[in-house]
Amino acid sequence: MTAGGATSPDDRIELRGIRCVGTHGVLAEEQERAQPFEVDLDLAVDLHRAGDSDALEDTVDYGAVAHVVASTVSGPRSFALLEALARQVADDVLALDIRISSVTVALRKLRPPLAVDIETVGIRVVRYR
């Protein structure tokens, strides 16, 4: 927020480390056996009114956002690519609340089935309303 009560284009709601399991991947084993994923979100939201009112109805409910993310990743739909899954997460989050002007989704596969020692693989997408 800037001086005089103006809204800030830099206001963000951050969700970190949403963990859920899903059946996403190119390999047959990934499409049959659930594996862990982790999601971080940055929501661009005008937080001026909520800062003044201290009322939940004046902001985006991050509990509802986390639920949407978990439902998308763990839901019945399967994606071959992380890029497609992240796009769906972004679309579902933007559909949740008109006050979200953009969303950044960082999506990581926590145990990628690779023949090298690697902790995670992931992607980051940004989508705007």
Image (cartoon, rainbow, N blue to C red):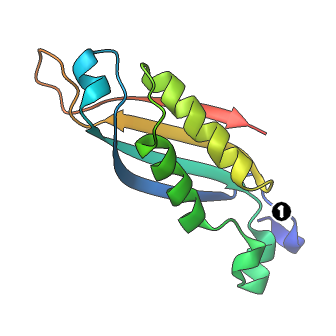
Q: Note whether 121 is above or below 54 in the view shown.
A: above
- Dot 1 corresponds to which residue? 7
Determine the image quadrant of residue 38: top left
Q: Secondary structure at mark 1?
A: loop
Name the image quarter holding the C terminus.
top right
Picture residue at 51% right of the left edge, 43% below the top: 72
Picture residue at 44% right of the left edge, 29% below the top: 78
Q: Residue 116's spot in the image, x, y percent? A: 12, 17
Q: Residue 21's spot in the image, x, y percent? A: 32, 44
Q: Residue 127's spot in the image, x, y percent? A: 68, 34
Q: Note whether 61 is above or below 31 in the view shown.
A: below
Identified by mark 1, the residue type is Thr
Determine the image quadrant of residue 79: top left
Q: Nearer the viewer, residue 40 or 19?
A: 19
Q: Nearer the viewer, residue 76 or 125?
A: 76
Q: Nearer the viewer, residue 4 or 126?
A: 126
Name the image quarter holding the N terminus.
bottom right
Picture residue at 41% right of the left edge, 44% below the top: 74
Picture residue at 24% right of the left edge, 32% below the top: 33
Q: Note whether 68 is above or below 34 in the view shown.
A: below
Q: Nearer the viewer, residue 72 or 3?
A: 72
